[in-house]
Image: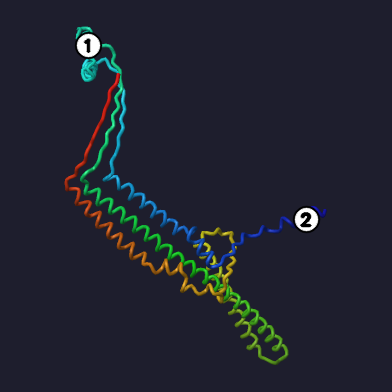
Amino acid sequence: MSIAILVFVGALQAPPADTVRLTLDQALARSLTANPTLRAERADARAASALSLEASRAFLPSLKLEAGGVRTTDPVAVFRPKLCQARFQAQDLSLDALNQPSPYAGYTAATTVEQPLVAPEGWFGYAAARRAAAARAAGAERAAGATIFLVTQAYWDAQLAAARLDALDSSLAAARAHAERADRLREQGLVTGLDARLARVRAAAVEIQRLAAVADAANARAALAALLALPDSAALLLADSLTSDAADTSSSPASQDSLDDGGDVRAARLGAAAAGAGGKGGGARELPHNRAVGTAARFRQ
């Protein structure tokens, strides 16, 4: 019987929720690696950088390798490679050999090297791709600064909402105690019924404010958890209080480096430069292009 009771009690106990304890610095560090919006911005920047490498093909040499095989009894296809390889013999001039040659088989291999010499469209295209990649990188840096700002704001919003809820808890307890005392005094004839009703109304108003504060506190923590890419089951424990030194972030090196570097302005300027280079590349299509091509081929029977 005791075993059954132990099992039943254990089944009633819900598993503890995952608790995540975070200082402000820890929250900022996590946001710079886990924030989904920031990760998307950085992925776009890496993709733009890869596109600039692809654009460099406009002035880099290219190598092409080709191989093929042939087996034929067509007279022209048989005699031509023999003549080219100086392997034509007297018996190849007989009527039977001319009309019905023996099957000829062989393979060919060729290597072609191509080097652009004058490629203005490719030059401008490469410049546009590089500037576009730099613009995306600047945008990612600015996104990091914006993430730091949003996480800092959400962190202290959550702490402020929790402090407001604590204050309303105390106010509600005091208001209820005052309403109970007013009811007792009314029973003793020391106050009127109107005074007791007013006390209960004030207590109800504080309770309504507390319900709104509970929702605000939950929303603030949910907003912070979303910025940090934390699961819904995670219970946040914010270690830095509103009165701690961490609440003063005006001189934070991370915030200064990320928010004051003008990443958005640099991104806009680089984007405009990329667009200008792209426009020049479109006009360069009408300019002459030149390239050097070399091919080495070999045929063997």
Q: CA distance from mark 2 to mark 1?
A: 103 Å
Q: Residue at x 51, y 61 (%)?
A: 30
Where's residue 202, x and y in %? 60, 83
Where's residue 174, x and y in %? 65, 82
Where's residue 230, x and y in %? 54, 59
Q: Left of 294 or right of it: where is 30?
A: right
Name the secondary structure under disc 1. loop
Residue lying at the far front of the rendered structure: 86
The answer to whether residue 149 is visible is no
Residue 89 is tagged as 1
- Looking at the image, residue 281 lies above or below residue 193: above
Q: Residue at x 43, y 65 (%)?
A: 145
Graded by Cα atoms within 10 Å as few (under 14), some (14 to 19) or many (20 or more), the crowding at tag 1 reads few
Residue 261 picture quarter: bottom left
Where's residue 36, x and y in %? 46, 57
Q: Nearer the viewer, residue 251 or 149?
A: 251
The image quadrant where one finds the C terminus is top left
Which residue is identified by label 2?
6
Residue type (three-letter) at the residue carrying disc 2: Leu
Residue type (three-letter) at the residue carrying disc 1: Gln
